[in-house]
Amino acid sequence: MGKRPEKQSKKNKKKAASQSKGSKAWSMFSLASAVVGATAARKSLNASWKAATGSPPPKNPADPGVSTREAVTWVISSAVVSQLGRTLATRRAARYYLRSTGHNPPPPRLPKD
């Protein structure tokens, strides 16, 4: 007959449970930092837009009352600044996680097909 599968040691079970908890903690921490980063970037962009143009940013770029140039400029700058803020905040959170735990955060889980 074949070999019996080895039992997982208590130490390995604790390590796996600890990594699972760390993974959940990292998921929540990275999500929170991304939201905060994107929100801060968006507020900064709104203030910059008002300072540069003298008018508030368009609430709805698809509104026919908003010029195409203004709508496109707002959409591009909004997307770039929001993603930049999110990325920088997530990277900073990853550095904090590394300093706190001594290892890199777990990679993101990709959806299964």
Image: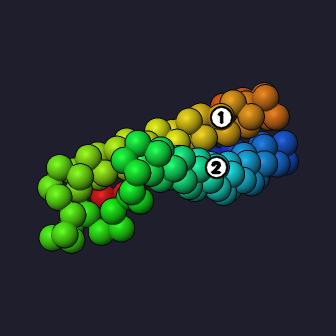
Side of 26 relative to 65 (left or right): right
For residue 3, above or below residue 111: above
Towards the viewer: 41 or 95:
41
Side of 78 relative to 88 (left or right): left
- Quote the CA–CA distance across marks 1 and 2: 9 Å
Quadrant location of the C terminus in the rendered image: bottom left
For residue 90, above or below residue 42: above
SS at badge 2:
helix
Towards the viewer: 102 or 85:
85
In the rendered image, residue 53, in percent from the top left (x then y), is placed at 36, 47
* Residue at the disc numbered 2: 33
Which image quarter: residue 91? top right
Q: Is residue 19 visible?
A: yes
Side of 75 relative to 6 (left or right): left
What number is the disc on residue 92?
1
In the rendered image, residue 17, in percent from the top left (x then y), is placed at 76, 52
Furthest-front residue in this view: 54
Q: Name the residue: 17% across, 49% down.
A: 69
In the rendered image, residue 75, in percent from the top left (x then y), is placed at 29, 52
Please report whichever mark, 1 or 2, sits nearer to the chain's N-terminal start: 2
Are the residues tagged 1 and 2 within 8 Å (C-beta)? yes
Amino acid residing under circle 2? Ser
Amino acid residing under circle 1? Arg
Q: Name the residue: 36% across, 68% down.
A: 59
Crowd around label 2: few <14 · some 14–19 · many ≥20 (10 Å): many
